[in-house]
Image (spheres, rainbow, N blue to C red):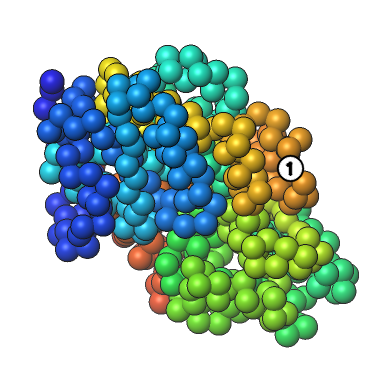
Amino acid sequence: MKKKRILAIGLIAVMAISLAACGSDSSSSDGSATAESGSSSSSGSDVITFWNVATEGTDAEVVSYAVDQFNENDSETYGGYTVEVTAIQNDNYKEKLVIAMSSGECPDMYSSWTGGPLAEYINSGYGVPVTDLVEEYGLDDLLLEAAIAQGTIDGEIYAVAYKTISISGVYYNKTLFEELGLEEPTTLSELEEICDTLLENGITPFALGNSTKWQGSMFYQGLATRYAGLDEFRDAYDGTGTFESDGFIYAGNKILEWAEKGYFQEGCNGVSTDDGQDRQAIYQGTAAMLYSGSWYCGTLKSDDADWYTENFGWFAFPQIEESDDPAGNYYLANGTIGDQFITFNCEGEKLEAAFKCFSYLLSDEAIQMNIDGGNIPPIQGVEDMLEDQIAIEIVEYVNKCTDVQLWYDQYLPTAVANAHLDSSQLLFSNETTSEEVAAAEQAAMEEYLAEQ
């Protein structure tokens, strides 16, 4: 059994920030989670530890369904293993997972958003390829090609999607748009004309809850992608480019311009999207649009299904005319084709059992549970299973996209992601400049690369 090397993704900073928060809940599932690939666990336990962020609602119900199905029906067939779940809040999850890995207690199966962190987990030895199992269970014919690609590293599948298509887009009050004679924009200048008309009528264009910072990050990423495509970000990530390039400066300047005009909810950096304070502005008629991930189909539907169906529309972030490739960049999605991906940190008989448990997450029953809960499972032909018109539009758009960029704060190493979130949030309150944001991101990226 090989000894794992320590993760490099800002580990010292992560531990200093997060160790106090890594209490009993992060190990409540099983204290003997495997530290080394190929072992049942550090103490020879027959328990499969499963960490994820499914803490409530449909997400928790689907995970519980899969685990119960395995434990009740398959445990004896698969070596007597049982699966125990630890669900951790989203905002603390990455830090706790890294700390567990660094202390030799990585769970046997765990969820992630893929991207840069997944590559670090795999390079550090905390995951095994499951390409053969994906084919054995027919998941290569079930999942969307983009979902499989997102979990693939160096030609091998290390993380398997199961939850939902989750890309950014604009939800808007179509009833209000109709009353004001507004139509869905196809270009950024048309979107700005809409925003100006809304302001003239006493309505804030965008409801924005940016206290958690990632909501505002979507605007930054959306603008950078539509203006410059994806190469600038990927070059900045691997060190061949810089976060001080044109696309990021453009994105920062545009947010500053919009903030100055009043396009965003007043005091947005103190407004919580987690508590629904942003979308309440739309229900109250004081704001018209909300730019967020497509999980909002389920969120808005759970608030009031009838109001959602009657009043909400959706459109992908529009083209930017000044871009070198407006049409091409339009079909670059930001988000994830799967949202949650499961990686396996075990081998042999234990891996077979863990993957069998995972397979229930993509069973017909689990897929329907996800759809009923407002998710859009990342499977082929899912649009034919949906009744939600907005969800269907989202899938139709994704089917035309040529590439997908994971959320910046999930793709970037932890220290760089924090620098991005902290600095870009200040754009929405006009407390910084686009150059200062870019410099902060670049400095964090250079420090991270130097540590490698």
Q: Residue 198 occupies which quadrant of the picture?
A: bottom right
Residue 415 at least partly seen: yes
State the image coordinates of residue 218 (x, y, percent, origin top left).
Answer: 52, 57
Between residue 46 and residue 287, name the one nearer to us.
46
Q: Check disc 1 and report the residue beneath it.
A: 386
Between residue 13 and residue 107, name the one nearer to us.
107
Residue at (70, 67) in percent of width and height: 304
Between residue 409 and residue 122, name the one nearer to us.
122
Q: Amino acid at mark 1?
A: Leu
Residue 442 at least partly seen: no
- The quadrant of the rendering that contains the N terminus is top left
Horizontal side, residue 9 vs residue 131: left or right: left
State the image coordinates of residue 128 (x, y, percent, origin top left).
Answer: 30, 24
State the image coordinates of residue 290 (x, y, percent, origin top left).
Answer: 63, 65
Horizontal side, residue 300 vs residue 14: left or right: right
Q: Residue 449 occupies which quadrant of the picture?
A: top left
State the image coordinates of residue 318 (x, y, percent, origin top left).
Answer: 69, 53
Residue at (13, 22) in percent of width and height: 2
Between residue 293 and residue 412, name the one nearer to us.
293
Residue at (78, 50) in percent of width and height: 389
Task: Please say if 439 is above or below 255.
Answer: above
